[in-house]
DNA sequence: GTCTATACTTGGATAGAC
DNA sequence: GTCTATCCAAGTATAGAC
């Protein structure tokens, strides 16, 4: 829709400046959602953190909610990239638990899942926001399902529970763990669970050798 | 601290009136947290819903946060009562899954867990609130642990994972499921999971008959 | 096109009326 | 003791300056 051509060199340098401001606001929004939560993520709180005028939020994003969604998009893309790379290097069920533990720690340090949790919980306060946030969570169900299929696909329990349903609970558990961990700042209980899950996966691998679905090693 | 005696009949009727106002505010707070979330639970939004003057929030509770905590207390006590009664009538692992499914539906209908989720997520915005909310969640870990011990105590997996750690993840999963269910209003995915869990429990019960820990029936 | 100063609205809290 | 009218701070949004 907007004209783009050599007629306005101003637009080019201007666009560059605009992009920098937008990015600074998005970064400040992520930090604010982490530290002050959805309720504390006002245009003033965000722009103060970025050291920018409060009106810029509305000039660049139209509304606070739009900025929050832009920040959620930024985090989601970043995480999806990181998770995808991590899982690409993995094939066994045992390995994926190591990666998952590592990623959970990283998520907790960077506070990225907190951003998602705050947006989900905050969605109730603004009409229409729920649908927007929901659309941004959906890719994670698919991602979790693919990861489960890749690593547990030939396990006997895969036959008992559809991976799509399990993926839903994996996402739910991850969100819940993040909430509880963030609440008291103690990540130990969650890490213990990852360790237990690791054990279970190993055990499951040993058991599956005795089931008819997986013939005992034929090289 | 406050004088209580026959010298002031005004106090008695006054106290009664006060209690009614307090209760009306607490009820309105629960409804507001459910429908507008933590960010939307302002003194004005709450008092408007109750049809009362906004200043009463501060007269009766001192601050909005105090009222929110009073509402959380109210919900927590109510739920703990209901859950305890339900679990008292139950002994087998299979039965508890039925009860759990039923309670999840009830929670979703009444929106009680939403109140808790909103308070956890909203805690980030107010210094000190996290500790208060954390203290109100702790009883649920104990409750979940006791329920697990009661129903899965003699199961073989109980030996593999400490019930306290599992209780933590049960609470986390419950919170996560509530978040996702509330977000798009579709409870089917969560209910499917309860059904699958039910299946698993039955299967586990059958398996445990073959383990050395539980001798095969000696009446 | 980018940003700042200003207008208007909502929210938290209290002084004072009943 | 209970409640309301009023005050001031914080929030969203935009008109206008650069």
Image (tube, coloured by chain):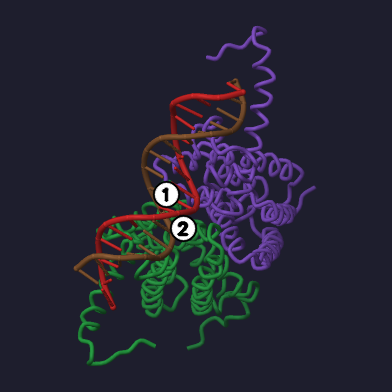
Chain colours: A purple, B green, C brown, D red
Q: Quadrant of the N terminus of chain B?
A: bottom left
- Which residue, given by chain and number where applicable, does mark 2 sit on? B118
User: Are there few (<14), some (14-19), or many (20+) residues within 10 Å of tag 1?
Assistant: many
Q: Are marks 2 and 1 on the same chain?
A: no
What label does residue A124 carry, if any?
A: 1
Q: Who is closer to the viewer here, B151 or A66?
A: A66
Return the residue nearer the eye: A52 or D8: D8
Q: Position of residue B57 (x, y in %)?
A: 35, 65
Q: Position of residue B67 (x, y in %)?
A: 40, 67
**How many numbered circles are shown?**
2
User: Label 1 lies in what chain?
Assistant: A
Query: Which residue is painted at 67% across and 8% down in the image?
Result: A6
Mark 2 and mark 1: span between their CA atoms? 9 Å
Name the spot of residue A113 as percent of width and height, x first: 61, 51
- SS state under label 1: helix
The answer to whether residue B8 is above or below residue B73 is: below
């Amino acid at each position: 829709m907007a004209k783009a051509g050599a007629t306005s060199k101003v637009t080019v340098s201007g666009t560059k400046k605009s992009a920098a401001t937008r990015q600074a606001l998005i970064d400040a929004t992520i930090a604010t959602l982490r530290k002050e939560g959805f309720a504390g993520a006002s245009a003033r709180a965000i722009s103060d953190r970025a050291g920018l005028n409060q009106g810029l939020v509305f000039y660049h994003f139209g509304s606070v909610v739009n900025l929050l969604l832009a920040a959620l998009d930024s985090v989601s893309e970043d995480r999806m990239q990181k998770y995808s790379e991590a899982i690409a290097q993995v094939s066994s069920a045992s390995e994926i638990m190591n990666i998952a533990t590592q990623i959970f720690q990283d998520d907790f340090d960077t506070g990225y899942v907190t951003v998602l949790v705050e947006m989900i919980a905050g969605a109730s306060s603004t009409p229409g926001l729920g649908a927007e946030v929901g659309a941004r969570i959906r890719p994670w169900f698919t991602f979790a399902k693919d990861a489960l299929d890749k690593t547990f696909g030939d396990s006997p329990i895969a036959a008992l529970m559809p991976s799509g349903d399990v993926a839903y609970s994996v996402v739910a558990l991850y969100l819940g763990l993040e909430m509880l961990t963030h609440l008291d700042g103690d990540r130990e209980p969650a890490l213990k669970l990852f360790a237990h899950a690791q054990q279970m996966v190993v055990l499951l691998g040993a058991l599956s050798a005795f089931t008819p679905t997986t013939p005992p090693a034929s090289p």
